[in-house]
Image (tube, grey):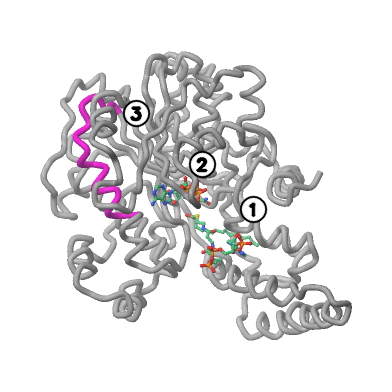
Amino acid sequence: YPTMAEFYAGKTVAITGGTGFLGQGITEKLLRTCPDISKIILFIRTKRNTDPKERLKQLAMKPAFDILRQSQPNFHEKLSFVSCDLEADDLGLSSDDRRTLRNEVNIFIHSAATLKFNEHLRISYEMNVLCVRRLLKLKWNNLQAFVHVSTAYAHVDRKYMKEEFYDCGIDYLDLEATLKWLGDDAIEKLTPDLLKTRPNTYTLTKALAEDVICRESGNLPTCIVRPSMIIPAWQEPMPGWCTNVYGPTAFIIAYGKGLLRCCLADREINADLIPVDFVVNGVIGAAMKTASEFIHRRRSSGYNKIMSSETARKSTNIQIYHINSSTTNPLNIDKLSKYLVAYCQRVVYDYSVFALQTLPAHVMDTCLSLANQKRQFVKLNGKIQSGMEVMGFFFTTNFQWDRSNADRLLQAFQPGDRKMYNLDVRVFTWKDYFMTYISGAKKFILKEE
Ligand SMILES: CCCCCCCCCCCCCCCCCC(=O)SCCNC(=O)CCNC(=O)[C@H](O)C(C)(C)COP(=O)(O)OP(=O)(O)OC[C@H]1O[C@@H](n2cnc3c(N)ncnc32)[C@H](O)[C@@H]1OP(=O)(O)O
Ligand SMILES: NC(=O)C1=CN([C@@H]2O[C@H](COP(=O)(O)OP(=O)(O)OC[C@H]3O[C@@H](n4cnc5c(N)ncnc54)[C@H](OP(=O)(O)O)[C@@H]3O)[C@@H](O)[C@H]2O)C=CC1
């Protein structure tokens, strides 16, 4: 395999979700460490009345690029965009942009998704599953790697996950047909039956998307990266860098602000959290390995007809990489329990929340009202609790992952690249990392020094 910088020299990379947490990290690292990369095309939608052109300008000003800006002030010249709406039939792409993508893109990274756990199944399906089907059909002429970002929690109906495809229990083609004629209310009623033992629509649709990749990617050089819970950066682009409050971040902030006293969690389980820099390295490296093997095989790429799920799973050679921490550097929740009261019993948790959070929130709001100020604590407490409700499943269930493929991926990197694109999480201790995590949440989310 070539070095990462050699491999990406002259390449055009396209990324969906480039405005998101992981996408910003990937874009920044590619530009900073692969100086001869030709171009990065970001799929950007219009959001809150801001068009993609303006959003790209705003993106280049974001903290993720602060370090890069110092060494390469003109880095934005390598960034371009296509205007999209990934939930639309035609992905919201113009015919000119389609042509550009078909003919120019060498590496495609699909990172966009809706991450809302309890999203309506129709929206979650359209964004997380149907969009993947449409992207695979773009008739890529020059593609060397199609990297699909999934999640290590896609198959939470199992307790042990290997880096392989699993039967989802639902055929997405049947589901798609059903969603076409059912109304939104009926879908909502049907959702618990479809989820079975899964906690939410997010994990179901991420699992179905993997089935799409398995059955429909044909000869396209495809791979899947499954990160566990992505948390602020360990080191890159800067320690503690983050953009959202997903996973435990909302709770860590609420704890720090004195708003969270109890947690629905089982002390015995390992929390699988992974700093974003390792995931960025995994995606960049997986693309390099997939493309290098594809170029070596010199097979033609193209979209094939859909295979049955079972045949596809048996015949596939698509590589899957678990980018996680608990397999080699576990973080036991018990270690956090001197800071938080963790309950795994629902009834005890409910009483504690009432006594330690809900009641004090009402008292505080009454005081605010008496002082003619805006009430806020009851609302904040409600948000924290709805966050805890959707997270409770993950905080109380233990999972294990095999990561042999991810280890092999690191071995495929040139020796000089193994540190710069490290995937081995044993290099940090959780105690030290949590100081970084907390200062990152203060700096990048709360905007406090
Ligand atoms: C110290 C604690 C330590 C505990 C132990 C740690 C144990 C760790 C165990 C491992 C965890 C593993 C988790 C694995 C998850 C799967 C991994 C993935 O693929 S990744 C998938 C990761 N996906 C996620 O993490 C998604 C989780 N979030 C959701 O599903 C939804 O946002 C929602 C249900 C919480 C609210 O929905 P809805 O009412 O429709 O409204 P919106 O969505 O529009 O947001 C409204 C407001 O809520 C805010 N907010 C966001 N998140 C949280 C939160 N967790 N809480 C509170 N608040 C939250 C949000 O910022 C916004 O604020 P504002 O702008 O209004 O001020
Ligand atoms: N965060 C985590 O803990 C984990 C994430 N993952 C996976 O990693 C990937 C990236 O997640 P992350 O970066 O954290 O998520 P973010 O929420 O930060 O980013 C999501 C990205 O998807 C884009 N997007 C969503 N809907 C659309 C749409 N209809 N059209 C165009 N773009 C859209 C968003 O664009 P916009 O800016 O316009 O909203 C944004 O760029 C996802 O596939 C997720 O499932 C896997 C495991 C854990």
Q: Nearer the viewer, mark 3 or mark 1?
A: 3
Quarter of the picture containing the C terminus is top right
Q: Position of residue 297 (x, y in %)?
A: 21, 22
Residue sitting at x 35%, y 43%? 84
Q: Which residue is mark 3?
A: 107
Q: Quadrant of residue 156?
A: bottom left
Q: CA distance from mark 1 to mark 2?
A: 22 Å
Residue sitting at x 33%, y 53%? 87
Q: Is residue 135 magenta?
A: yes
Magenta span covers which residues? 128-144
Classify mark 1: helix, strand or loop.
loop
Q: Closer to the N terminus: mark 1 or mark 2? A: 2
Q: Position of residue 313 (x, y in %)?
A: 22, 49
Label 2 near ligand 2 (CB < 8 Å): yes
Which circle marks residue 331 in the picture?
1
Q: Which residue is mark 2?
A: 22
Q: Residue furthest front?
A: 49
Judge whether 386 appears above or below 354 on screen: above
Classify mark 3: helix, strand or loop.
strand
Q: Amino acid at mark 1?
A: Leu
Residue sitting at x 51%, y 44%? 20
Residues tagged 3 and 1 counted as in contact (Cβ below 8 A)? no
Q: CA distance from mark 3 to mark 2?
A: 16 Å
